[in-house]
Image (cartoon, rainbow, N blue to C red):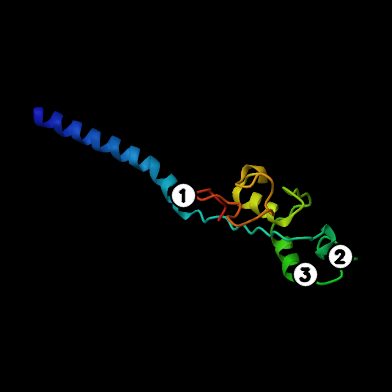
Amino acid sequence: MKNKSLINSVRTFILIVNAIIGSFAPQILIAQKTPPPNIIIFLMDDMGYGDVRIMNPQDCGFDTPSIDRLARDGVYFTQAHSADALCATTRYSLLTGNQVFRGRRTEGTWDNLTKGQIMPGQKTLA
Protein backbone atom coordinates (compact mmCIF):
# COMPACT_ATOMS: atom_id res chain seq x y z
CA MET A 1 0.00 0.00 0.00
CA LYS A 2 2.87 2.36 0.82
CA ASN A 3 4.48 1.64 -2.55
CA LYS A 4 1.28 2.58 -4.41
CA SER A 5 1.05 5.82 -2.48
CA LEU A 6 4.70 6.61 -3.20
CA ILE A 7 4.26 5.84 -6.91
CA ASN A 8 1.17 8.07 -7.09
CA SER A 9 3.04 10.89 -5.34
CA VAL A 10 5.97 10.59 -7.77
CA ARG A 11 3.58 10.53 -10.77
CA THR A 12 1.78 13.61 -9.49
CA PHE A 13 5.08 15.43 -8.95
CA ILE A 14 6.29 14.54 -12.47
CA LEU A 15 3.00 15.72 -14.02
CA ILE A 16 3.18 19.03 -12.16
CA VAL A 17 6.81 19.61 -13.19
CA ASN A 18 5.99 18.77 -16.83
CA ALA A 19 3.02 21.14 -16.79
CA ILE A 20 5.15 23.97 -15.42
CA ILE A 21 7.96 23.39 -17.92
CA GLY A 22 5.47 23.00 -20.77
CA SER A 23 3.80 26.30 -19.97
CA PHE A 24 7.09 28.16 -20.53
CA ALA A 25 8.10 26.34 -23.73
CA PRO A 26 6.01 28.44 -26.18
CA GLN A 27 7.47 31.72 -24.88
CA ILE A 28 11.00 30.35 -25.13
CA LEU A 29 10.45 29.14 -28.71
CA ILE A 30 8.85 32.43 -29.77
CA ALA A 31 11.65 34.48 -28.20
CA GLN A 32 14.29 32.49 -30.07
CA LYS A 33 12.58 32.91 -33.46
CA THR A 34 12.02 36.67 -33.26
CA PRO A 35 14.54 38.37 -35.56
CA PRO A 36 16.19 41.61 -34.48
CA PRO A 37 14.71 44.78 -36.00
CA ASN A 38 16.31 46.37 -39.05
CA ILE A 39 17.00 49.99 -38.20
CA ILE A 40 18.98 52.33 -40.42
CA ILE A 41 19.74 55.86 -39.27
CA PHE A 42 20.82 58.43 -41.84
CA LEU A 43 22.59 61.44 -40.40
CA MET A 44 23.29 64.00 -43.10
CA ASP A 45 24.79 67.44 -42.85
CA ASP A 46 23.06 70.38 -44.50
CA MET A 47 20.25 68.34 -46.04
CA GLY A 48 16.86 69.93 -46.41
CA TYR A 49 13.36 68.52 -46.65
CA GLY A 50 13.27 69.01 -50.41
CA ASP A 51 16.61 67.34 -51.17
CA VAL A 52 15.02 63.88 -51.55
CA ARG A 53 12.72 63.19 -54.49
CA ILE A 54 10.08 61.29 -52.46
CA MET A 55 9.58 64.39 -50.28
CA ASN A 56 9.79 66.93 -53.12
CA PRO A 57 8.95 65.22 -56.44
CA GLN A 58 8.51 68.39 -58.52
CA ASP A 59 11.47 70.50 -57.46
CA CYS A 60 14.18 68.03 -56.40
CA GLY A 61 17.21 68.73 -58.57
CA PHE A 62 18.49 65.15 -58.68
CA ASP A 63 17.31 61.54 -58.48
CA THR A 64 17.47 59.65 -55.19
CA PRO A 65 16.13 56.20 -56.17
CA SER A 66 17.66 54.20 -53.31
CA ILE A 67 16.45 56.57 -50.60
CA ASP A 68 13.04 56.78 -52.28
CA ARG A 69 12.76 52.97 -52.34
CA LEU A 70 13.73 52.72 -48.67
CA ALA A 71 11.08 55.30 -47.80
CA ARG A 72 8.38 53.56 -49.85
CA ASP A 73 9.14 50.11 -48.42
CA GLY A 74 9.74 51.20 -44.84
CA VAL A 75 8.92 54.08 -42.56
CA TYR A 76 10.00 57.68 -42.89
CA PHE A 77 9.31 60.63 -40.70
CA THR A 78 8.18 64.07 -41.76
CA GLN A 79 9.13 65.79 -38.49
CA ALA A 80 12.73 65.91 -37.30
CA HIS A 81 14.59 67.67 -34.54
CA SER A 82 18.29 68.21 -34.12
CA ALA A 83 20.32 68.53 -30.95
CA ASP A 84 22.20 71.45 -32.48
CA ALA A 85 22.76 73.25 -35.75
CA LEU A 86 26.29 71.87 -36.07
CA CYS A 87 27.16 68.40 -37.32
CA ALA A 88 29.63 67.41 -34.56
CA THR A 89 27.23 68.20 -31.74
CA THR A 90 24.42 66.37 -33.49
CA ARG A 91 26.63 63.30 -33.97
CA TYR A 92 27.64 63.41 -30.30
CA SER A 93 23.99 63.56 -29.21
CA LEU A 94 22.98 60.71 -31.52
CA LEU A 95 25.84 58.47 -30.36
CA THR A 96 25.49 59.11 -26.63
CA GLY A 97 21.91 60.23 -26.09
CA ASN A 98 23.21 63.30 -24.25
CA GLN A 99 23.16 66.99 -24.98
CA VAL A 100 26.61 68.43 -25.72
CA PHE A 101 26.92 70.25 -22.40
CA ARG A 102 26.91 66.85 -20.64
CA GLY A 103 30.10 65.77 -22.36
CA ARG A 104 33.75 66.40 -21.63
CA ARG A 105 33.76 69.87 -23.14
CA THR A 106 30.84 71.88 -21.79
CA GLU A 107 31.79 74.90 -23.90
CA GLY A 108 31.19 72.98 -27.14
CA THR A 109 32.66 70.34 -29.38
CA TRP A 110 34.71 72.47 -31.76
CA ASP A 111 37.11 74.06 -29.28
CA ASN A 112 40.43 72.19 -28.97
CA LEU A 113 39.39 68.61 -29.71
CA THR A 114 42.64 66.99 -28.62
CA LYS A 115 40.85 64.57 -26.28
CA GLY A 116 37.55 64.27 -28.11
CA GLN A 117 34.09 64.86 -26.74
CA ILE A 118 33.15 61.27 -25.84
CA MET A 119 34.66 60.33 -22.49
CA PRO A 120 36.36 56.96 -21.85
CA GLY A 121 33.83 54.37 -20.71
CA GLN A 122 30.86 56.42 -21.89
CA LYS A 123 28.12 54.25 -23.39
CA THR A 124 27.35 54.98 -27.03
CA LEU A 125 24.99 53.78 -29.73
CA ALA A 126 27.89 52.01 -31.45
Q: Is residue 30 above or below residue 38?
A: above
**Residue sitting farthest toward the right:** 58
Q: Say which residue label 2 marks.
A: 57
- Asked whether the viewer can see residue 25, the reply is yes
| Mark linked to residue 64 | 3
Name the amino acid, label 3. Thr
Badge nearest the viewer, 1 or 3: 3
| Residue shown at the point (67%, 52%) measured from the top left | 109
55 sits left or right of 3 in the view = right
Label 2 residue SS: loop
| Mark linked to residue 68 | none
28 sits left or right of 103 in the view = left
- Asked whether the viewer can see residue 1, the reply is no
Closer to the chain start, of discs 2 and 3, is 2
- Residue neighbourhood size for the residue with mark 2, other residues' Cα within 10 Å, grouped as few (<14), some (14–19), many (≥20): few
Image quarter of the C terminus: bottom right
- Residue neighbourhood size for the residue with mark 3, other residues' Cα within 10 Å, grouped as few (<14), some (14–19), many (≥20): few
